[in-house]
Image (cartoon, rainbow, N blue to C red):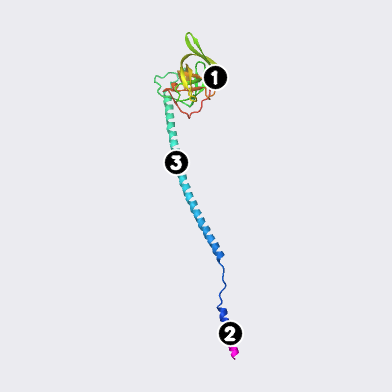
């Protein structure tokens, strides 16, 4: 009887001890590390998105500023174009009113009204020299005081006690050289901008026609073979009779 009781007590104690045993320990360190990495990645992505958003807003603002500036420039350009076109139209209408009327016999009748308008020529103009009979393209330079002519084989000589000049003019249209002789008007000193040296050039008076206006003007004689145009038109020819519109096309030989 005692042995049975003792056995029962032993069994009860063992069962109690087994119920009080500690649960197995679970290692969650890897899961926590992975979770931390995910959180850091999300935080970094949020920061990058904020930076991209700020950059996009800055670029958008710059684009709007550039677009507004471009619109202003285009508007000003269009206004200038309209104003210039109005001036050209006004000049054309004035020239039309002042143009001499044609007679029934086909001749032109001179108008008694004085011509007060200026002729409009381009940055490159077609001129005609009556002596010799040759047409040339000329560059118009409002900064030059005196016109210049491409002259080759320049020879100075004396005739009837006066100084004369003989030279050749390249006739580009007909691909030939035209010889001519003219009385020497004067000599001018030209300062060379490259080496600060001076060069004395001969000056002659030639009858020239440009934009329908005929006059006698001075030309300095110089070898312009290395330049694009054989003639340079200066202020002595333009005077108060012509204005320059560089937007006009280069004229062609008739």
The residue shown at (58%, 86%) is: 8
- Measure the C-alpha gap from mark 1 to mark 3: 50 Å
The residue shown at (49%, 55%) is: 47
- Circle 1: element type: strand
Q: Position of residue 142 (x, y in %)?
A: 45, 25
Residue bearing the label numbered 3: 69
Say whether marks 1 and 2 touch (CB < 8 Å).
no
**Above or below 2: residue 148:** above
Return the residue nearer the eye: 7 or 129: 7
- Whichever of callouts 1 and 2 sits on the residue coming sooner in the sequence is 2
Return the residue nearer the eye: 80 or 195: 195
**Above or below 176: residue 50:** below
Residue bearing the label numbered 2: 10
Residue bearing the label numbered 1: 170
- Measure the C-alpha gap from mark 3 to mark 2: 99 Å
Is 78 left, or right, of 254 in this rendering?
left
Return the residue nearer the eye: 36 or 238: 36
Let me know if residue 111 is in the magenta part. no
Q: Position of residue 33 (x, y in %)?
A: 55, 62
The residue shown at (57%, 83%) is: 13
Q: Quadrant of residue 168?
A: top right
**Which residue range is magenta in the image?**
1-6
């Amino acid at each position: 009887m005692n042995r049975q009781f003792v056995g029962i007590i032993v069994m009860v104690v063992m069962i109690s001890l087994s119920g009080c045993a500690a649960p197995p320990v679970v290692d969650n360190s890897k899961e926590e590390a992975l979770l931390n990495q995910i959180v850091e990645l999300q935080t970094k992505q949020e920061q990058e998105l904020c930076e991209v958003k700020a950059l996009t807003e800055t670029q958008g603002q710059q684009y709007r500023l550039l677009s507004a500036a471009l619109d202003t420039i285009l508007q000003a350009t269009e206004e200038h174009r309209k104003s210039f076109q109005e001036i050209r139209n006004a000049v054309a209408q004035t020239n039309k009113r002042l143009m001499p009327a044609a007679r029934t016999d086909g001749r032109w009748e001179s108008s008694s009204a004085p011509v007060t308008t200026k002729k409009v020529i381009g940055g490159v103009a077609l001129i005609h020299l009556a002596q010799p009979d040759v047409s040339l393209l000329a560059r118009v330079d409002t900064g030059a005081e005196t016109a210049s002519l491409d002259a080759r084989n320049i020879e100075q000589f004396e005739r009837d006690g006066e100084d004369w000049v003989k030279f050749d003019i390249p006739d580009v249209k007909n691909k030939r050289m035209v010889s001519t002789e003219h009385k020497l008007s004067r000599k001018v000193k030209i300062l060379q901008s490259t080496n600060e040296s001076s060069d004395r050039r001969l000056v002659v008076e030639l009858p020239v026609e440009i934009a329908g206006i005929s006059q006698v003007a001075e030309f300095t004689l110089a070898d312009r073979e290395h330049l694009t145009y054989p003639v340079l038109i200066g202020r002595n020819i333009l005077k108060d009779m012509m204005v320059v519109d560089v937007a006009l096309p280069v004229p062609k030989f008739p």
